[in-house]
Amino acid sequence: MGGDTAAPDRPEALAGCTVVLGVTGGISAYKAVEVCRQLVDLGAHVVPVLTEDASRFVGETTFSALASERVRTSLFDDADPIPHTRLGRSADLVLVAPATAKLLGKYAAGISDDLLTATLLATGAPVVLAPAMHTEMWEHPAVVENVATLRRRGVHVVEPDTGRLAGGDVGAGRLAEPSRIVAAVLHMLQVPSASTPPDLAGVRVLVTAGGTREPIDPVRFIGNRSSGKMGHAIAQVAAARGASTTLVTTQGPVSIPGVTAVDVDTAEEMAAAVLAKYDDVDVVVMAAAVADFRPKVAAQEKIKKRDGVPEILLESTPDILAALGERKRAQVLVGFAAETERVREHAAEKLAAKRVDLMVANDVGAADSGFEVDTNRAVLLDSSGASEELPLLTKVELAGVIWDHVGRILRTPVLKRGSS
Ligand code: C5P
């Protein structure tokens, strides 16, 4: 087990969390026993699900003894006629370690021919996969594409290590050490671990999320496609890293550990909620997609079809970020620029115009980035003129990168923070 037997710090960090631990049939299945033990040590409720092949490599009795529930192997050996939906729904996270090429292929293709793959398709919980296989298989274009597809869908893949493989070969494809797999679980569940120190302790943070809704009448509104996922991930990660976090969201009600949520609907309500808090915070992240226009007058009663097509006169909404920029003292301001073309250029213009310290420019024109999906591709621009182009990341990962940058800005004296 490569000497990796130490459970991560923070005893009971996973108390109250249910983790479905899928084990597939690879030679490294024995390492899943150690993963199981570390998760249980951290207080997780672990439900092991073994594929038929996994049972050839590792004993069901070992898992049943170590885990919180007996091993499940089949869709049909339960009193429950639909164990996969129950498991999928009850899970806070589904982890598969080791994940064979076969499991990656089935999951990417949406095939559910056993309890584990059915559970993966039935769950809405975060999924972590720790692949393990021979180098040739790991580098095969089919596997590379399956991994890319799964990552695009928001699945967290723990890169295998390079080292000694079954049969004495050496190369990439060795199952990651149990502590790295468990660290990924802690990361996905937003539980601070040794690798996510509470570096934002004492920092007061305000995050906005979601698209505003500007009423046309009591049932209709002008809205946009923002799901709030990016802003919620930013608030989640801030709280996990120790910040005192308020989230102003149009996508409530939400319950995120350590986050105080304020529900709003319109740009006007969001502006009021943000400005009321502004003097008491150190960082504002405006991840919300605030409508730029709203109907000048909202009808009191539902507009009737029989009255013909209404003419709706629009007016501008308050630009919250610009207002924050104008009355900024020492606060760090983070803005988002959702663009469909000339992303970098437009973002740089907004950064200067709104006196923003960090602009997150994302391309909302691509299928795997921006609105509604769990992944995002962004360029970060700061007021010193520096920029960083990031690869496709999950929104939680991107949130981590944004807070790393904000942390650096907070540590820079105000007078040296660039031209804003
Ligand atoms: O100029 P644009 O609206 O594209 O700028 C986007 C940034 O400004 C985002 O951070 C968004 O939250 C913020 N914004 C705002 N108030 C508005 C419009 C956008 O705070 N009315």
Image: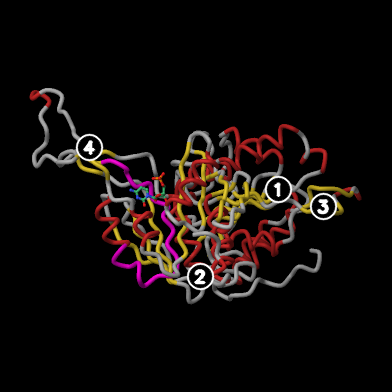
Three-letter amino acid code at the position of disc 4: Leu
The answer to whether 97 appears left or right of 68 in the picture is right
- For disc 2, the marked residue is 15
Residue 406 location (% of width, % of height): 54, 63
Residue at figure coordinates x 62%, y 47% from the top left? 390
The answer to whether 209 appears left or right of 175 in the picture is left
Q: Residues within 10 Å of mark 3 (few under 14, many from 20)?
A: some
**Residue sitting nearer the eye, 285 or 179:** 285
Start and end of the magenta stretch?
275-293
**Residue sitting nearer the eye, 215 or 313:** 313
297 part of magenta stretch: no
Report the Cα–Cα distance between label 4 and label 2: 51 Å
Residue at figure coordinates x 42%, y 67% from the top left? 245
Three-letter amino acid code at the position of disc 3: Thr
Name the mark nearer the viewer: 1 or 4.
4
First in residue order: circle 4 vs circle 2: 2
Report the Cα–Cα distance between label 3 and label 1: 12 Å
Q: Residue 314 shows which numbered tag?
A: 4
- For disc 3, the marked residue is 162
